[in-house]
Amino acid sequence: MSFASSLWQHARWGLLLLLLLLAAPPLVTAQETDRQDTFVYGINAGIPDAVIGTFAPPAVDTIYLMSTETSILSPRITSVYYWPITNDYRASWNVLNEVVEGDLEIMRGLQTIETIKQTTYTIHFHVGRGSANKPTLYIGADAEKANAQFQADQLAYRNAALAYEEARLAWLDAAREAQSLGVAPDDLPKAPVEPAPLNTYSTGLNSGFPLKLEPGDYRIRTKTADGTIVPKSERRLVVFEPRRTAVGYEVIPEQRWTFPEESNDPEGAILGAENTVVYLKPFVTREYPAISYTRLQNPQDASVAQAGEWTWVAGEPIEDSVLELVSGNRVITQIPLQAYTVKQTPGGEYGYEILEYNASTPDLTPRIDFVGYRLPFTSDNRNFSIQLRSPDDTLLLGSNRVMRVAGRNSPILLGFISLLPLLAGAAILGWRQQQTSRIKTDNAA
Amino acid sequence: MLRTEDLSKSYDGHVAVQGLNLDVRAGEIYGFLGPNGAGKTTTIRLLLGLLQPTAGEIFLFDQPITGDAIGLKRRIGVVAEEPLVTTRMTAWEFVRFFAGLNSVAQPEGRMEVLFKALGLWSARHALAAAYSRGMRQKLSLVRALVHQPDLLILDEPVSGLDPHSILQVRAVIDQHRDAGGAVLISSHILSEVERSADRIGILHNGRLLIEDSMGGIRSRLGSSNIVHLTLANEAPTLPEKLQSIPGVQKVDVQPRQLAVHVAGTRDARPDIFQAVVVAGAILIEMALEEMSLEEAFVTITNQNVQQLAGAG
Amino acid sequence: MSVTRSSSTLRWHNIRRIATQQPRETIFGWGIYSVTAVSVGIAALLIFNSVRFVGESSLNIVAQPFLLPLQTALTLAILFVAVEATLSIARPREQGSLQILFFAPIDETILIGGNFLAGILVYIFFVLLILPTLFLLSWATNFVIPAQLIWAIIPTLFVVGVAVAFGLFVSASARSARSAVLILVAVILILLGLQSAYSALLSIPPTSRFYDALLFIRTVLANLQLILLWISPFHMLNVILTAALNDDWLVLLRQTGIAVAATAVWLFTAVRMLRHRGVLP
């Protein structure tokens, strides 16, 4: 028997065992398709400009949260079922949503480092532009106060809306009557003013564990008042922070403003075609471990995320700085932030025109479509960089970008460059041939 | 310089070398003979550590080769049977590379001497792979000698060489021996070994059948010399007188020509001359024909075959 | 004439001798220049594509315009040195010329060590051939090559080490040069095939009637891939380049450590296999 066949004889059983072991996890999870009432953690994971709502069924061993934001874990008993089409567990909150009383123990290794009491909380989501729409998390007394305020505001708005509706109907009747009497339009009764919409939405009062921990690897569990650990409440908790915080840019090409692109990495370059214009919208961007950020959004994400992979996440916009163009080490110009209006122009080159917004010309620029910095790529300045300077005259870290006007597209030149290694080879082998001689024997010589 | 003790090698049930006891000394050329498949190449591979022996020990310069094999290899030069040179180096670079491996400082002088001695000087900057087989053979000898080894192992060193090259190679080998080096020549060109070897070992079926000088081999074989006589006249009593000389085994008689077979290595020519004179014959020529290595080789290997057949 | 050296000094001396001789064999052949030309050709094609994209859409934001071209070129370089390493023992052994090298003060460790360093040197030569052409491409397209990308090439030497060591292991183990190359090709095909098969399975939508039926295979492939990611030089190259570019020293150190460990394991097994198989045809 050859060595190879002997090796195969031994290896094939090992291979079979390995295949079975590798297949073990799906065999187990694939069976759990029945609906069951079980312990879960409801998660409101705070990220810089939002709160992400998700949950961790018993199959999820690890929960990921950010260290920079406060998040809420809510211990609940709910009805969980496996949904094979999307290959994940889902919760029927409307069927069962029972609060589990108890405290959250946070452990590092075997040592409990903190015990967190369950408290009330509420999250208010706001409608607005830019940083104004960042949700607000209220905890404890603040939550109750905010919730009371929200309910009062809601009630006030409802009353105002009802009053407005009544006034509007009365005004319509009055207007119709005046019109039938031939009253001149200018003398018609004034329409009632619509109340300002309520731009806040609330999750209502809930209870949970507010968490804002240092980055690290923890274990958590929920403990009832009598000291028993709630079954299935033990999990791993990974708290992470951004590795780098920088300034990202949303880059809007003038030629196709509906297809903006993002430049998050300060090491990256923005390459533009000669004689074109782009508009830059800066924002705060943060770089997170890809696996942590993905599973913060969906703890059940089973994709093969790789350690060492990072992802940039766009955050709040920056709207108070000045963009500087730098050539060499010299600032050659400063560009202020400007509001723009996109005006449709049938028959035009792009079908639209981007105009500077001017409040005094409402016919020409009726609204603000976006705000940004206008930056032309010209043949005069093919290599330059940009940076942002804040109102307090400091450069924003990570705001620098290399800007390049792309060179001519010359396939012949690129093809010639590809041949250079062969030319180098020909030169070296030619030199070598000169070094070596043809065979001459001493006798012949 | 080189000694083996009960060296054996067998693989796949086949015994290639069995109980081999070799002894190659400084300042001698040792002819290592054997028919194809006798185990010569296996023995050389064992000596170089390319194969591991099944039993027995090898001593190079009185040290077992299981110890500092790397250090020992620096004192050996080897020419393989097949002078393969698969490289893009020139002959000069090739030898310099091996000189470097043997830690020879400034080998150029030595290389020049060897290249010139073997007639390769004009072709030293040609690609070694482009050399003819004979030139590669000589280049292998340059490679083997560049670091001035104490022991030179040559496997068929002159096969494929033209007569002029054979003389060049022979001179270089003799020079090495004269300088106190030892040479082990494995060859099937018996005349070449007979001409140069100080001692000879004959290997057959993996066993060393005999190891001695050429004279010693003749003596130990009990072989007969033949004295050829050419006469000017007929001498009817001469065969009888020759037969009575001690050691004469038989006399072949032809008109005016006799062949006297003398046992052993004793020189019987004075006695024969005296018998010729007494018998009244007129001697035109008397020539001694000794047993050649070829005959000894055939005799020894045949005996061995018969012994083996008898034993079987 | 002979310089007296201790055994360990002599070993190191001869490892260096082989390490400097073997690359000469490569440099004086057309193979390396052909593969380099192909590498630069692919790099030029990718850059050409980026320039075209800028021309058509007026904008291209790339983290590193030369990262993918460089990575492609280095991948081909690694393949080249891996193939060279795969042939470095099996071919001369098959021809019978390997034993001639062993007439000199050489043993298995010296040969493997020398060929290993030779592979690294060939890779460095390959990189030195590529770099000027990349700078020319940068000049022609006005695309920037950051200094960091050039520095990132240095830790890739550890990845090459894994590929060369594996090639030497295959070379030491194989019966012939042909079977050595076939084994290497098979391993590469398995690596690529696994990746492609997994990607193909991932692309099957959950609504497909085959989705659940293929769950088992998908999970097996995913787990196998996780294992292979630790040993695949191509994955290591990706991780090391990215980590070096991002100043991610922790990942860089960890991956370098893994590469060094993998290299040591392959080299050790290569020496063992060479001892087992011998140097004779």
Image (tube, rainbow, N blue to C red):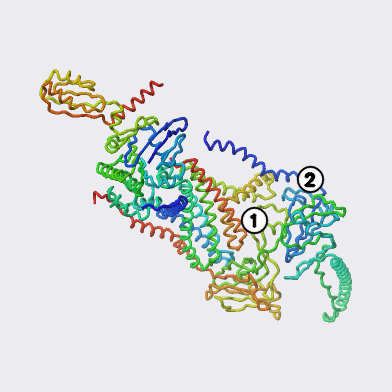
Label 2 Cα crowd, 10 Å radius (few <14 / some 14-19 / many 20+) = few
Q: Quick check: do tags 1 and 2 share a chain?
A: yes
Where residue A185 appears, as percent x and y from the top left, is: 82, 79
Is A30 on the left-hand or right-hand side of B242?
Answer: right
Mark 1 highlights which residue?
Answer: A307
Where residue A175 appears, as percent x and y from the top left, is: 86, 76
Is B256 on the left-hand or right-hand side of C93?
Answer: left
Q: Amino acid at mark 1?
A: Ala
- Please, which chain is the residue tagged with disc 1 on? A
Give the answer, above or below, for where A220 lies relative to C97: below
Q: CA distance from mark 1 to mark 2?
A: 33 Å
Per the image, label 2 sits on a secondary structure element best described as loop
Depth check, front residue: A69 or B276: B276
- Please, which chain is the residue tagged with disc 2 on? A
**Residue B192 seen from this side:** yes
Q: Which mark lies nearer to you, 1 or 2?
A: 1
Is A27 on the left-hand or right-hand side of B144?
Answer: right
Mark 2 highlights which residue?
Answer: A34
**Residue C69 seen from this side:** no
Where residue A168 appears, as percent x and y from the top left, is: 86, 72
Q: Quadrant of residue B214?
A: top left
